[in-house]
Image (cartoon, grey):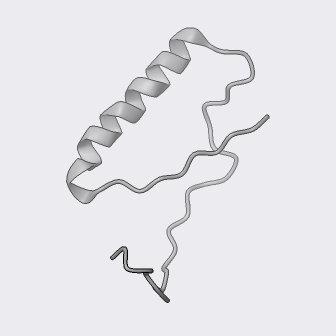
Amino acid sequence: MNTVVRYKVWPERVAENEELVRAVYRQLHALRPAGAKDRCEEAPQAIEASVVGNFGFL
């Protein structure tokens, strides 16, 4: 089973998120769980989006 996790980070929490991601990779490197990959299958992509509706959330 493959799992991909995507999420957005609040601009003021970027540094904290970077450290948390590093900690996850340190733990994965130490534990070396079977089947875990520590690389992306494709490079991250920045795309532009247009908001067409916000359902009252924004």
Name the outermost residue toward the left: 12
Q: Residue at x 28, y 49 (%)?
A: 14
* Quadrant including the C terminus: bottom left
Name the outermost residue toward the top: 31
**Residue 43 in picture, x, y percent from top left:** 60, 54
Name the outermost residue toward the right: 1
Name the outermost residue toward the bottom: 52
Count of numbered badges drawn on the protein: 0
**Residue 27 in picture, x, y percent from top left:** 48, 17
In this rendering, the answer to whether 24 lies above or below 11 is above
Q: Nearer the viewer, residue 46 or 51?
A: 51
**Residue 38 in picture, x, y percent from top left:** 60, 31
Q: Is 49 situated left or right of 40 in this image?
A: left
In this rendering, the answer to whether 9 lies above or below 26 is below
Q: Quadrant of residue 36?
A: top right
In this rendering, the answer to whether 49 lies above or below 17 is below
Q: Is 29 situated left or right of 15 in this image?
A: right
Q: Residue at x 68, y 40 (%)?
A: 3
**Residue 16 in picture, x, y percent from top left:** 26, 39
Q: Nearer the viewer, residue 4 or 43?
A: 4
